[in-house]
Amino acid sequence: MGIHKKFYLIRFFQKLAIPFYEQECWEWTGALNSDGYGAFWHGRNVNSHVLAYEIFKGTIPRDMHVLHGCDNRRCCNPEHLRLGTHAENMKDKVVRGRSWRGGSIRKAQHIIPVEVTRANL
């Protein structure tokens, strides 16, 4: 292992909070991107959970995404990460309530809820 790889691994692990019980989420304590995922500089910005997957499980095939089983965007525990397609990722987003009718949850937060009653139909 080259000195450069050792250096980035040390930097990466310094930004992880690994709990006593390793089956729990390994929280990313470094920078976050605008979507709330851990951000790590490794020649370019890389999502921390994607890098964790590559470190512990290997290369990510083309057209595959790293999905969180725990639904915690900061989690880097390799036991909580799995590969999936874009369609599976979008399905997870809807099932877990992070989507609003196929749109962005950020956009949905700006909509004022209106109570639907027979009178206003």
Image: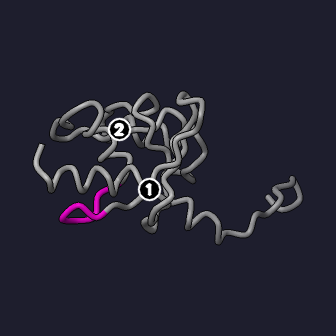
Pointer 1 residue: 15
Nearer to us of marks 1 and 2 is 1
Residue at 14 percent across and 53 percent down: it is 3
For the residues bearing labels 1 and 2, Cβ distance under 8 angstroms: no
Q: Which mark is residue 76?
A: none
Q: Secondary structure at mark 1?
A: loop
Residue at far left of view: 2
How far apart are labels 1 and 2 at the CA level? 30 Å
- Location of residue 25 with respect to 111 vertically, above or below: above
Q: From the image, which quarter does the N terminus lie in? A: top left
Residue at 39 percent across and 49 percent down: it is 13
The one of 54 and 118 positioned closer to us in this rendering: 54
The one of 2 and 12 positioned closer to us in this rendering: 2
Pointer 2 residue: 87
Q: Which residues make up the magenta segment?
A: 41-47
Residue 19, quarter of picture: top right
Q: Is residue 42 magenta?
A: yes
The one of 92 and 83 positioned closer to us in this rendering: 83
- Location of residue 104 with respect to 22 vertically, above or below: below
Q: Position of residue 109 (x, y in %)?
A: 64, 66
The residue type indicated by label 1 comes to Lys
Q: From the image, which quarter does the C terminus lie in? A: bottom right
Q: Is residue 7 magenta?
A: no
Residue at 37 percent across and 31 percent down: it is 82
- Location of residue 19 with respect to 41 vertically, above or below: above
Q: In this figure, which colouring scheme has been used for the structure?
A: one colour
Q: Position of residue 100 (x, y in %)?
A: 57, 53
The residue type indicated by label 2 comes to Ala
Q: Earlier in the sequence, mark 1 or mark 2?
A: 1
Dot 1 crowding, Cα within 10 Å, few <14, some 14–19, many 20+: some
